[in-house]
Amino acid sequence: MEQNQSDEQKNNKRFQGGFGLPTVLAVGAVVGILGFGLGKQTGPLNLNQYASTNQELPQDLSYQSVEEVYDKLRERYAGDLEREALINGMKSGLVKAADDPFTQYLDAEAATRLEQNLEGEFGGIGAEIGRRDGQLVIVAPLEGTPADEAGLQPQDAIVAVDGDNASEWTIQKAVKRIRGEEGTDVTLTIVRDNQSRDVTITRGQIDTPSVKSEMKKGDIGYIELTQFSQDSAQEFHRAASQLQQQGAESIIVDVRNNTGGYLEAGINITSEFLESGTVITEQRRDGEVLSTERASSGGELMGVPAVVLINGGSASASEIMAGALRDHDAATLVGQQTFGKGSVQDLAEFSDGSVLKVTIARWYTPDGSNIAEEGITPDKEVKASREEIQNGNDPQLQRALDILTQQRE
């Protein structure tokens, strides 16, 4: 890294969670919890290329009206006020005014949680949260975590936490309230299918590997990706090589309930199946193409028959991989409609440890589709309930096995 780089350049990292993560009530919002996103491990960014069309805004803000509100609040408020909380509140309010669920101000504590989430270690209930239609929702529970064992499902709306109305909460506030010491309880009031219910969950330490693999029947290998962490691409490559050594001639990749992670990991894993070609294109809101991410040549699984399992909890990097493999005819998509996160975030770190996660572009699949809000439709739609999967009767996985078996015959 060159010595003359500015502090701003040094402190920028690319995300796309997540959300978001990014982010799971502890990763992206795994509770732990953040939001969710998808990041990209790269060198310093030239942020000038991402400048939006907000040139009409003044370069400098007038703080007079803000100071007037501060003075009146300090003079007249009957309760106790904390300076740091007020400052963080002003920053959060400024960012919230952008009206984008993936543009967020994270204080130092929340930023630390985001980093822990992407490293795959965090405390909480083990579910990722986001926003959909103005509501806090479960994006996906992580397999084997307290949230999963309590029966939380993708798209469950969170309306209260420990009896407190959460309808107006930010993702960060929800994360803060849901997180807590291992062994303590938190009660979420959720709405599913227009019915409200309370779910009490005992918090735990969440430590989940991002890649799991095994041989299925015959010569079919199976790889489950729980998130796109810093090491996921290497772990995926290793798992694919081991499965092929065990005789795998076709592959199932399971990204159900995978809410994203690092963009670079998603691109590298997608490249395992492709000889070349576009993985995603990033565009500014005015339509200008910012960058085109291409597959590296000659992947380990190039030409290998493949099925990708997706559902409503598949977001961000999962959707990038699924969309690229679909558009290149490299895999069949089986399952249900994905979440629909089609934007790219940048992380700007500040001297106090806080972070601004800001949407800088939208991404498009190789055929030019942006899946924001809509999600990706599977080639073969197969519904599956949590109970079916837990009881060993997974109709989506079974359909994938059938497809690959028929292709072999």
Image (cartoon, grey):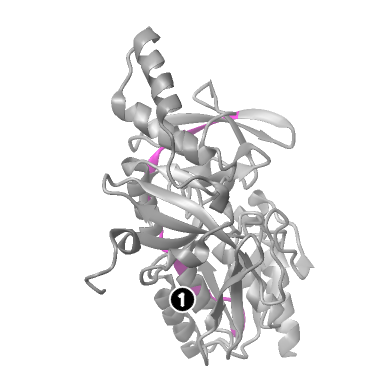
- Magenta residues span 198-219
* Horizontal relation, residue 112 to residue 159: left or right: left
Q: Which residue is painted at 49% across and 52% down in the image?
A: 358
Which residue is situated farthest in the left direction here? 3
Our reading of the magenta stretch's main secondary structure is strand
Q: Name the residue under label 1.
A: 236
Q: How many labels does the image show?
A: 1
* Horizontal relation, residue 403 to residue 362: left or right: right
Q: What residue type is labelled 1?
A: Phe
Where residue 374 appears, as percent x and y from the top left, is: 73, 56
Where residue 396 appears, as percent x and y from the top left, is: 70, 64
Q: Nearer the viewer, residue 310 or 50?
A: 50
Where residue 233 appears, as percent x and y from the top left, is: 44, 75
Asked where in the image residue 190 lies, by quadrant, the reply is top right
* Horizontal relation, residue 1 to residue 74: left or right: left
Q: Quadrant of the C terminus?
A: bottom right
Q: Which residue is painted at 27% across and 44% down in the image?
A: 352
Q: In which quarter of the image is the N terminus?
A: bottom left
Secondary-structure class at tag 1: helix
Q: Which residue is painted at 52% across and 38% down in the image?
A: 96
Asked where in the image residue 382 lies, by quadrant, the reply is bottom right
Q: Does the magenta portion include 86?
A: no
Q: Which of 100 and 125 is in front in this view?
A: 100
Q: Does residue 228 appear in the picture of this structure? A: no
Q: Does the magenta portion include 212?
A: yes
Asked where in the image residue 100 lies, by quadrant, the reply is top right
Q: How crowded is mark 1: few (under 14 residues within 10 Å), some or many (20 or more)?
A: many
Q: Which residue is painted at 49% across and 41% down in the image?
A: 95
Where residue 130 appears, as percent x and y from the top left, is: 56, 45
Q: In this view, does 98 lie above or below 184?
A: below
Q: Does residue 47 appear in the picture of this structure? A: yes
